[in-house]
């Protein structure tokens, strides 16, 4: 689960719905807060929501938890942890892995001072928490497991999880498990830079929502076809130096020209799918191991306004 900002057209209607904010150039812009629940193993978007820019991301996350099932494990960054949010997961029998701020609570501070690599601790609602209409009180406690993760630069991260059994879930697995969260960052990058989600086809809120959800849908269709082809490529690896995968950018381009035909054709849609599979397989790139990408925080906040291609947007 993660959120991102989308820059919207500057209209009174959208300002009223989503609110306005200042970017780093001190210019007011209209932005919405998007939140997506993303299956990082299958690369499928399970759900998404678009809200006003000042909406708490935990509120959005709770809306998307309806797409989860008992026993699912959801990964969050450090903007999500709270007693109430963790309580919600235990009530829904959902597992979680969350990055914690070092100053989240005295419990986390004590854990850092202890030097331990893993510890099961109890947390309670914060002293200033509004408990009105909550299903718990100030004495309610929850058990979570804290983990100390040493990063390559020497920094320390603290993770919290509902996976309490250290024999079944050893400390060593959590660093790689949390790193899986990077895939949702890649997903947002594709939405904005390859699927051009911010190039809206209209100025009304209805147009914004249609474009947002149709883009998530198209991304899922592309994934289903691409991943099937990628599985075939791995089986055909042979003695090649590198493994290969479908070129994502080009695959979206091929989809753009065929997405309407795929669903509106009077002929067998499998003909279109087979054509796409052939095109995808003809355009592959090597997978080079141990490559890293540094996240550029706030790189989308400098945008003055989005590109509006009203009546000219590609069918994608």
Image (cartoon, rainbow, N blue to C red):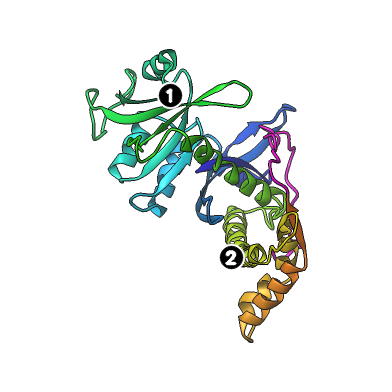
Using a 10 Å C-alpha cutoff, classify the residue at mark 1 as few (fewer than 14 neighbours), some (14 to 19) or many (20 or more).
some
Q: Residue at x 55, y 41 (%)?
A: 181
Residue in the foreground of this view, choosing between 177 and 62: 177
Q: Residue at x 57, y 57 (%)?
A: 213
SS of the residue at dot 2? helix
Residue in the foreground of this view, choosing between 124 and 206: 124
Q: Quadrant of residue 237?
A: bottom right
Across and down, in percent, residue 268 comes to: 62, 85
Q: Principal SS element in the magenta part?
A: loop
Identify the residue at the far top of this view: 113
Q: Which residue is mark 1?
A: 117
- Residue 42 seen anywhere in this rendered image of the structure: yes
Q: Residue at x 43, y 21 (%)?
A: 104
Using a 10 Å C-alpha cutoff, classify the residue at mark 2 as few (fewer than 14 neighbours), some (14 to 19) or many (20 or more).
few
SS of the residue at dot 1? loop
Across and down, in percent, residue 15 comes to: 60, 41
Q: Which residue is mark 2?
A: 224
Q: Quadrant of residue 164?
A: top left
138 over 292 or under it: above or below = above
Give the residues in magenta: 288-316
- Magenta-colored stretch includes residue 147: no
Instruction: Answer left or right for 129 relative to 32.
Output: left
Instruction: Answer left or right for 235 relative to 161.
Output: right
- Residue 309 seen anywhere in this rendered image of the structure: no
């Amino acid at each position: 689960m993660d959120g991102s900002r989308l820059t919207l057209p500057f209209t009174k209607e959208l300002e009223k719905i989503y609110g306005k904010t200042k970017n780093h150039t001190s210019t007011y812009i209209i932005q919405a807060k998007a939140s997506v629940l993303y299956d990082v193993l299958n690369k499928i978007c399970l759900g998404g929501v678009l809200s006003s820019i000042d909406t708490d991301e935990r509120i959005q996350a709770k809306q998307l938890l309806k797409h989860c099932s008992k026993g699912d494990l959801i990964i969050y960054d450090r903007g999500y942890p709270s007693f109430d949010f963790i309580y919600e997961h235990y009530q829904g029998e959902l597992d979680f892995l969350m990055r914690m701020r070092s100053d989240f609570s005295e419990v986390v501070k004590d854990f850092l001072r202890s030097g331990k690599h893993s510890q099961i601790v109890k947390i309670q609602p914060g002293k200033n928490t509004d408990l009105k209409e909550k299903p718990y009180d100030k004495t309610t406690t929850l058990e979570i497991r804290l983990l100390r993760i040493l990063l390559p630069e020497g920094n320390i991260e603290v993770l919290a999880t509902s996976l309490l059994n250290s024999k079944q879930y050893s400390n060593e697995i959590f660093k790689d498990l949390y790193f899986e969260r990077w895939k949702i960052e890649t997903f947002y990058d594709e939405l904005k830079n390859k699927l051009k989600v911010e190039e809206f086809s209209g100025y009304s809120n209805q147009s914004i929502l249609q474009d947002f959800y149709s883009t998530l849908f198209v991304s899922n269709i592309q994934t289903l076809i691409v991943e099937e082809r990628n599985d075939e490529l791995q089986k055909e690896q042979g003695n090649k130096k590198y493994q290969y995968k479908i070129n994502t950018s080009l695959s979206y381009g091929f989809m753009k020209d065929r997405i309407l035909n795929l669903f509106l054709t009077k002929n067998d849609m499998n003909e279109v799918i087979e054509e796409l599979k052939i095109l995808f397989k003809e355009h592959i790139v090597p997978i080079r191991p141990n490559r890293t990408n540094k996240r550029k925080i706030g790189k989308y906040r400098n945008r003055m306004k989005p590109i509006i291609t009203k009546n000219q947007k590609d069918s994608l």
